[in-house]
Image (tube, rainbow, N blue to C red):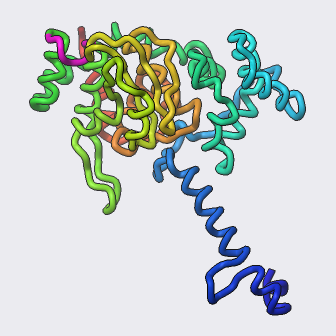
């Protein structure tokens, strides 16, 4: 490259003009910077060992490649037959995983596979292909009967203050979340955010809760709402007349709304958690302790190898030793 730049003045000007700051090199630098910005938009700087961004080996069979894969992706985009879409999504799973771990393609995954945006159930399908039926079903099976009552007991014993008191009372009023989601959000308070470096100040647990779930009243413009969303990491959007009477759930990713198949807040949060792994997106920095607890303790993913804070280990021990 150096020889080409210095061989004559015309080629030098073509690659870079020091007076105007223009030329091929300047153009390429701007292009690379734009692409890098797009990729980093929905990815925290911190990547934790054995988390959502870990490339995992799967034993999935009957996967398409080459021309057959490209043809299937075309069918996915244009077919109105949901069973066909789900079948082709299964057959392109490994190709999609490869794209998600390619920095040049990961941020375009919803452009290549837009049916995530209108076909509920695809997040759960991909997650199940990653981890199997047993792990995929753990949160819905175990949270309401095992973990929820124990988390409530831990919260009552910690005396963590007014925000938790408000969550504890939400099931008895008409303005708060239902008791299932309130219990999930209590976990944010007992596993609060920690400061991450000098540039990122510590936020409160109440502020961190807003990184997990947001409410939108029925009739509000989704387009207007998404335009105002600043969060880069996935969160759950609940749409209804009141917080404890939700009609529709969405996982918001890259300012796009992915419809949930869920009919309950527990099932909707299950899809939100799974979206991190399905789209290989790291946890929000303010919620690393919260999501790591859900990952290792409830789903049983990467137990013993995932990086856990002392606080996560402490709360798991408390929960395991409670008799309800």
* Whether residue 118 is visible: yes
Please give left or right for residue 204 compared with residue 63 in the image.
left
**Farthest right residue?**
67
Question: Which quarter of the picture shows residue 193?
Answer: top left
What is the magenta range?
173-179
Please give left or right for residue 84 compared with residue 152 in the image.
right
By secondary structure, the bulk of the magenta-drawn segment is best described as loop
Is residue 126 placed above or below 107 in the rendered structure? above
Is residue 323 placed above or below 190 in the rendered structure? above
The residue shown at (58%, 25%) is 117
* Whether residue 305 is visible: no
Looking at the rendered image, the quarter that the N terminus falls into is bottom right
Question: Which quarter of the picture shows residue 4?
Answer: bottom right
What x and y, as percent, mark residue 49? 52, 44
Q: Nearer the viewer, residue 258 or 10?
A: 10
Please give left or right for residue 68 compared with residue 166 in the image.
right
Q: Nearer the viewer, residue 287 or 300?
A: 287
Q: Nearer the viewer, residue 121 or 321?
A: 121
Please give left or right for residue 138 compared with residue 13 in the image.
left
Looking at the rendered image, the quarter that the C terminus falls into is top left
What x and y, as percent, mark residue 282? 49, 41
Is residue 36 placed above or below 235 in the rendered structure? below
Residue 185 magenta: no
What x and y, as percent, mark residue 112? 70, 34
The residue shown at (29%, 47%) is 194
């Amino acid at each position: 490259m150096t020889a080409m730049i210095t061989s004559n003045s015309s080629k030098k000007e073509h690659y870079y003009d020091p007076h105007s700051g223009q030329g091929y090199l300047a153009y390429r630098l701007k292009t690379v910077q734009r692409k890098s910005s797009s990729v980093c938009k929905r990815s925290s700087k911190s990547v934790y060992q054995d988390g959502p961004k870990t490339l995992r080996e799967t034993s999935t069979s009957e996967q398409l490649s080459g021309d057959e894969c490209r043809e299937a992706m075309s069918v996915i985009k244009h077919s109105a037959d949901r069973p066909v879409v789900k079948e082709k999504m299964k057959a392109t799973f490994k190709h999609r995983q490869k794209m998600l771990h390619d920095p040049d393609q990961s941020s375009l995954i919803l452009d290549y596979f837009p049916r995530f945006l209108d076909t509920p159930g695809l997040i759960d399908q991909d997650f199940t292909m990653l981890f199997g039926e047993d792990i995929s079903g753990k949160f819905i099976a175990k949270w309401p009967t095992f973990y929820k009552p124990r988390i409530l007991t831990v919260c009552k014993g910690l005396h963590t203050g007014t925000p938790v008191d408000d969550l504890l009372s939400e099931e008895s009023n008409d303005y708060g979340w239902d008791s299932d989601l309130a219990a999930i959000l209590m976990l944010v308070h007992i596993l609060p955010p920690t400061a991450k470096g000098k540039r990122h100040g510590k936020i409160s647990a109440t502020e961190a809760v807003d990184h997990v779930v947001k409410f939108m009243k029925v009739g509000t413009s989704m387009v207007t709402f998404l335009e105002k969303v600043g969060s880069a990491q996935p969160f759950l959007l609940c749409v209804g007349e009141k917080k404890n009477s939700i009609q529709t759930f969405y996982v918001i990713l890259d300012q796009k709304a992915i419809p949930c198949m869920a009919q309950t807040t527990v099932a909707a949060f299950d899809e939100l958690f799974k979206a991190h792994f399905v789209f290989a997106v790291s946890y929000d920095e303010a919620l690393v302790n919260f999501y790591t607890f859900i990952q290792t303790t409830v789903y049983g993913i990467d137990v013993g190898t995932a990086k856990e804070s002392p606080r996560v280990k402490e709360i798991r021990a408390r929960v395991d030793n409670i008799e309800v």
